[in-house]
Image (tube, rainbow, N blue to C red):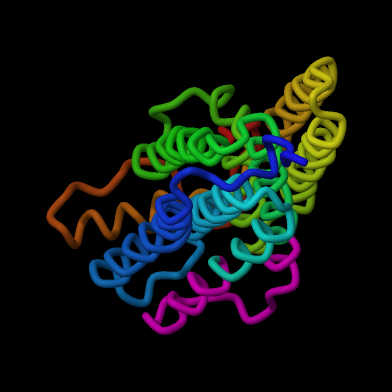
Amino acid sequence: MKPAPHTQPPIWPRLAWLSAAVAGFVAPALTVVVLGIIAPNTPLITFGGPILAVGLMGTGMIAAAADGRLWVGVALSQLAGAGLTTLTIALGLQVPLDLPSLGLATLIACISFAARGALFARSGADKGWWIAVFVVAGEAAIVLTALAQPGALPDWLLALLPAQWAAIAIQSALAGGSSETASAALIALGGTALATLLVAWLWPRRWTYLIMFTTWLALSALVYNSAAPPKPQDGLASAGTKMGQPPHSAPPPFDQNPNATPTRPPVL
């Protein structure tokens, strides 16, 4: 019996796994190394959320799309996250000693990203991992642009991206941020994972996509209207000063201004 299309291996399996390794670990690790060199002893809170989120997304989504199994994407993305965290410790960057909240955020993010990869494997067959590569590249570009140039992108655009939800959850865990911020992002990641797995399970029934897109929009609205996460731009501004660039003029992140009047700040 000829196997179902979604169970057939990809045409270029080595290229698929290489893409997962580069997007999920190599590129984020190089970014961490560069930031560790230009800003030694910098707390991970200054850039950890977006970079870890991109690493988890790259490994989890592409690996699950290439292999077709959810657990493979989850396991490999967890390994990538652990490797990136270990690298930051080796470089002397400050990492929180209490990591349960960080572990929970990364686990839910890994499941959410791997669920999308598993759906791509079923819907795109041997080309599903290519879809994953393009999705990872697009979301990573937006999230990292928001990290490098705070305020350059509209809040509503950032709130639509699961990669941004993961960045919010991880950033809050690293900084001990508000439970409201973390819970909104985690609920969004978990809800999207369930909706995506439902579509993959019922494939090729296309009507389930309506459930997934409705869930995605509703959870995006939840994240958009939640409290903002701690901001990383001050740490990056100090790094830019070391490279001869002018520091960013954004307000101080998280709790450095406890007497300020609370307003709804941007998503990242």
Q: Residue drawn 40% across and 51% down?
A: 15
x, y (%) of residue 19? 42, 51
Q: Residue drawn 40% across and 49% down?
A: 233
Q: Residue drawn 68% across and 74% down?
A: 99
Would residue 25 be found to the left or right of residue 202 on screen? left
Q: Nearer the viewer, residue 203 or 38?
A: 203
Q: Which residues are magenta?
A: 81-104
Residue 8 on the magenta span: no
Q: Report the magenta stretch's main SS.
A: helix
Would residue 184 be found to the left or right of residue 239 on screen? right
x, y (%) of residue 214? 80, 19
Would residue 26 be found to the left or right of residue 260 on screen? left
Q: Is residue 99 above or below residue 262?
A: below
Q: Is residue 76 visible?
A: yes
Q: Residue lying farthest front?
A: 1
x, y (%) of residue 104? 75, 63
Would residue 90 be found to the left or right of residue 115 on screen? left
Residue 101 on the magenta span: yes
x, y (%) of residue 189? 74, 43
Q: Which quadrant of the view contains residue 243? A: bottom left
Q: Is residue 103 above or below residue 250?
A: below
Q: Is residue 79 above or below residue 61?
A: below
Q: Residue lying farthest left?
A: 244
Q: Is residue 110 above or below residue 33?
A: above
Position of the N terminus by quadrant: top right
Q: Residue drawn 56% across and 38% down?
A: 126
